[in-house]
Amino acid sequence: MPRHVLATVALFVALVLLTAFGFSMISLHFRLPVVEEILLSMQQQETRKTRDYITNNLELMATRLGELQGRMLQLDSLGERVSSLAGVKSSRKAVNPDGKPGQGGPFLPEPMSATELQQEIERLAVVLDQRTDELAYMEFKLLEKRVEQRLMPTTLPVKNAILGSAFGYRNDPFAGLRSRHDGLDFSAPTGTPVSAAADGVVLAAVFHPEYGNMIDIDHGDGLSSRYAHLATMTVVESKIVRRGEKIGTVGSTGRSTGPHLHFEVQMLGVPQNPATFLKRGEAFAHSSRR
């Protein structure tokens, strides 16, 4: 092939390549802004998603923090009331214990970071656990107090009775000499119901030469009560009785001048003044004024 033909073909190919390259550059020049816009839009969407995710998390954490703060205020208030009822001194100091002036107003918290929010949530969670433990202890003390109250002979054993001989020394109704009286006498008609002054177990339900028909009830921890001169006994030894449960009726059996109930309270066998226990009940105060 002649050289001038080859040269013409080579020139034509070169022109085609240059033209293609030129069109490519022109196309790339016009398409580049579009690509940039697409990439920028994608970045903005990702940024928006990330920002929304962080914002939502912060809002959730702030809401959780508010809930914990509200629960702690409720627990503090409840704890104060329960501790007062349980007779347990609160571990928290009173308001303004250091003498600083009072402060108040709406709570307008400073914005907190995610880390600060998380730290505050963890701190409040620990405090709430402590408050819960305190309330559990107070609940135990309340239960203990309730059990103790049920085992304390504080219920009047005879209703609508007249208080006769008191605890202490008196002139013996038979001998007329000064003698010790280890209980309280409640005057009431024969057959008047007699109730247990507290929960307990019947130690004895027997006839005694001086006490007549007599019932002894064990209330635990060395505390017991005695009901004497009964006309009838409706319980037997080892029976579990409840506070206010009928155990017999008023009579005049044994060494007695007339129908009445002789009521005693003993601690480890030592007579105690029953009024010390009964004065906690409302009925005794009414009876003592009759």
Image: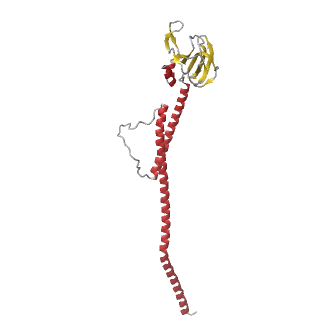
Q: Nearest the camera: 259 or 152?
A: 259
User: In the displayed structure, does residue 209 sit left or right of residue 126?
Assistant: right
Residue 123 appears in the rendering: no
**Residue 40 on image: x %, y %:** 48, 68
Q: Quadrant of residue 96?
A: top left
**Measured along the vertical axis of the image, is residue 187 above or below residue 30?**
above
- Residue 207 vs 78, above or below: the answer is above
| Residue 65 vertical placement versus 167 (above, below) | below
Residue 165, x across and y down, in percent:
51, 14
Along the line of sight, the residue nearer the viewer: 221 or 243: 243
Q: In which quarter of the image is residue 232?
A: top right
Residue 286 visible in the snapshot: yes
Horizontal arrangement in the rendering, residue 232 relative to residue 290 (left or right)? right
Residue located 50% across and 72% down the image: 35
Task: Say how many tags the image has.
Answer: 0
- Measuring from the top left, give residue 275's x and y in whole percent: 50, 20
Of the 4 image quadrants, the one containing the N terminus is bottom right
Q: Which of 213 and 266 is in front in this view?
A: 213
Task: Give the colour scheme shown.
Answer: secondary structure
Location of residue 143 in the rendering, given as x and y in whole percent from the top left corner: 54, 31
Q: Nearer the viewer, residue 113 or 262?
A: 262
